[in-house]
């Protein structure tokens, strides 16, 4: 069974998808980590786009997903932390806009999800990668709420320099890049269930998703419920 959760940056897709995985025993698949893996290669290739694309078939990247555990490897080296570095953050939108990279990631996502129960998070999973997913959710929250959550997370991690205004600008910039790119822009699938978490607690949000998954299999064929 395939459950996809798409939505804008900071909507809480990753904590939500992991919690759904934890409660269902499905494997959590982080599609962003794959784009980040290719961005890691882009940095290794000294930002040479043609070298990256030439070596695409031979990328040597590998991802392991087991319940809530998502790990990335390049050859024998684990790069789970490296793909979350600031440097990768700075370039991942650029790499995620390359058609050839999107095609490679799309293929890897389909392979990794074959004959398996998975909950995946991303931007274009319900529209492009898994148009026939069993369940599609589009998780949103208003930009101010997303900025505040992200700000609190950064403060919690000990970042004392950042301001709420910086975070708000960054959220708006990522929204713009993700939804205005030509290929596979961030977009709700017509048959996805939209969940606006602005005024929901985390538990309410999880309960709502699990209600669909457990009780409403027919939701698959509904439009805009
Ligand atoms: O979710 P994340 O921050 O790890 O995603 C990293 C980047 O990859 C972000 O710029 C959006 C892009 N992405 C995408 O274009 N399509 C996906 N299915 C997942 C992520």
Image (tube, rainbow, N blue to C red):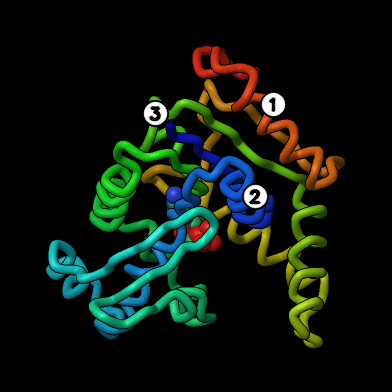
Q: Residue 80, percent across and down?
A: 44, 74
Q: Secondary structure at mark 2?
A: helix
Alpha carbons under labels 3 and 2: distance apart? 23 Å
Disc 1 versus disc 3: nearer the observer: 1
Tag 3: Cα neighbours inside 10 Å, few (<14), some, or many (≥20)? some
> Residue 72's x, y, as percent?
38, 70
Q: Can you identify the residue that label 2 sits on?
A: 19
Residue toward you, 126 or 215: 215
Q: Quadrant of the N terminus?
A: top left
Mark earlier in primary sequence (1, 3) = 3
Image height check: is 185 above or below 135?
Answer: below
Determine whether the residue tagged by mark 3 lies in a helix, strand or loop. Answer: loop
Residue at (73% x, 31% y) in the render: 208
**In the image: residue 22, left or right of residue 104:** right
Mark 2–mark 1 contact, CB under 8 Å? no
Q: Residue at x 57, y 47 (%)?
A: 21
Mark 1–mark 3 distance (CA, rounded to whole Å): 21 Å
| Picture quadrant of residue 54 | bottom left
Q: Is residue 43 left or right of residue 189?
A: left
Q: Is residue 141 left or right of residue 86?
A: right
User: Can you identify the residue that label 3 sits on?
Assistant: 131
Label located before the other in sequence (2 or 1) = 2
To which quarter of the image does residue 25 belong? top right
Left or right of 5 on screen, residue 106: left
Compared to residue 169, the image places residue 176 above or below, namely: above
Q: Nearer the viewer, residue 57 or 172?
A: 57
Which residue is denoted by mark 1 in the rendering?
211
Q: Nearer the viewer, residue 65 or 189?
A: 65
Q: Secondary structure at mark 1?
A: helix
Q: Residue at x 50, y 35 (%)?
A: 3
Mark 3–mark 2 contact, CB under 8 Å?
no
- Near mark 1 (Cα within 10 A), the count class, few <14, some 14-19 or many ≥20, is few
């Amino acid at each position: 069974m395939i459950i996809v959760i798409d939505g804008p940056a900071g909507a809480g897709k990753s904590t939500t998808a992991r919690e759904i995985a934890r409660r269902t025993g499905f494997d959590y698949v982080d599609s962003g980590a794959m784009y980040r893996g290719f961005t890691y290669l882009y940095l290794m290739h000294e930002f040479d786009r043609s070298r990256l694309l030439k070596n695409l078939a031979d990328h040597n990247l590998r991802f392991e997903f087991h319940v809530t555990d998502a790990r990335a490897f390049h050859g024998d080296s684990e790069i789970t932390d490296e793909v979350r570095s600031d440097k990768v953050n700075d370039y991942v939108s650029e790499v995620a806009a390359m058609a050839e990279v999107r095609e490679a990631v799309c293929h890897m996502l389909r392979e990794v999800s074959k004959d398996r129960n998975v909950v995946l998070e991303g931007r274009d999973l319900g529209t492009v990668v898994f148009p026939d997913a069993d369940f599609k959710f589009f998780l949103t929250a208003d930009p101010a709420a997303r900025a505040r959550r992200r700000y609190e997370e950064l403060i919690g991690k000990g970042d004392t320099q950042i301001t709420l205004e910086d975070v708000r600008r960054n959220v708006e910039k990522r929204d713009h890049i993700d939804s205005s790119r030509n290929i596979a822009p961030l977009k709700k699938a017509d048959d996805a269930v939209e969940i606006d978490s602005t005024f929901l607690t985390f538990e309410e949000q999880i309960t709502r998703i699990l209600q669909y998954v457990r009780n409403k299999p027919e939701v698959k064929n509904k439009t805009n419920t």
